[in-house]
Image: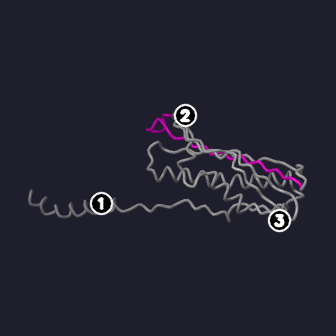
Amino acid sequence: MTTHKNKFLPYYVFVFLCFVIASCQPVKLENVVFDNNLLSKININAEKKIINKVYEINYLDPYIDNTVNPTAIERLNNWLDENLIVFGTENKLIINILEASLTKIERNFENKKLFNEKTEFYYEMKFKVEYILYDDNDFILSTTEANTKRSTTSSKYLSLYEKEKVANELILESLEDISLKSFEMLKLHMAKFLL
């Protein structure tokens, strides 16, 4: 009987090695692609566009603004710079980025019976942008504000890559939200200056 087991031992070793080799294959990592061409484009009748980053990155818990590179405020600034297009020979558009905060909070599951883990991470992204249109004499013609808030959750135990991917996906989805909300609010309050 032991000779029978010894006869199949090389096959067992071979199968075991195949499983080990298959499990050691690298995981294909997909990055989140930020393409401003996929976001809303807004054309507004103004000679100048000035973007002010009023919001300052916070380095205290629960804020994780500084851990993502480029930061959410830089991504928002890039979108505003590339997709908010000014044309014309009069008026001045001032854009104030009032908030671009990304937070991460560890919290208990609301329904603990469904999962083995008792805690999760809750991520929240907030954007707040103020648009002020001045005439050439610095009188306010129109003003509006766009606000968005989006959140997601993740497991407590993620790799650094997975944590960065969760944060970047949240920033991208929030950028989509703020681009749509900005268009909606500008159309509502500055329709006669839009193309």
Q: The disc labelled 2 sits on which kind of residue? A: Glu
Q: Secondary structure at mark 2?
A: loop
Mark 2–mark 1 Cα distance, whole angstroms, equals 38 Å
Give the percent coordinates (x, y) of residue 62: 56, 38
Q: The disc labelled 1 sits on which kind of residue? A: Phe
Which residue shows up at 61% across the image and 61% down it? Answer: 34
Q: Dot 3 corresponds to which residue?
A: 87
Q: Secondary structure at mark 3?
A: strand
Q: Using the rendered view, name the quadrant where residue 47 is placed.
A: bottom right
Q: Is the residue 111 above or below the residue 152 in the image?
A: above
Give 131 or 51, whichever is nearer the viewer: 51
Q: Dot 1 corresponds to which residue?
A: 19
Q: Magenta span covers which residues? A: 111-135
Give the percent coordinates (x, y) of residue 119: 48, 36
Q: Dot 2 corresponds to which residue?
A: 110
From the viewer's perspective, is 179 left or right of 3?
right
Q: The disc labelled 3 sits on which kind of residue? A: Phe
Check the picture and name the quadrant holding the N terminus: bottom left
Dot 2: within a 10 Å radius of its alpha carbon, few (fewer than 14), some, or many (20 or more) residues? few
Q: Main secondary structure of the magenta part?
A: strand
Give the percent coordinates (x, y) of residue 21: 30, 62
Dot 3: within a 10 Å radius of its alpha carbon, few (fewer than 14), some, or many (20 or more) residues? some
Check the picture and name the quadrant holding the C terminus: bottom right
Is 134 covered by the magenta stretch?
yes
Is 60 covered by the magenta stretch?
no
Q: Which mark is residue 129?
A: none
Which residue shows up at 83% across the image and 65% down it? Answer: 87
Q: Is the residue 186 above or below the residue 8 in the image?
A: above
Q: Earlier in the sequence, mark 3 or mark 2?
A: 3
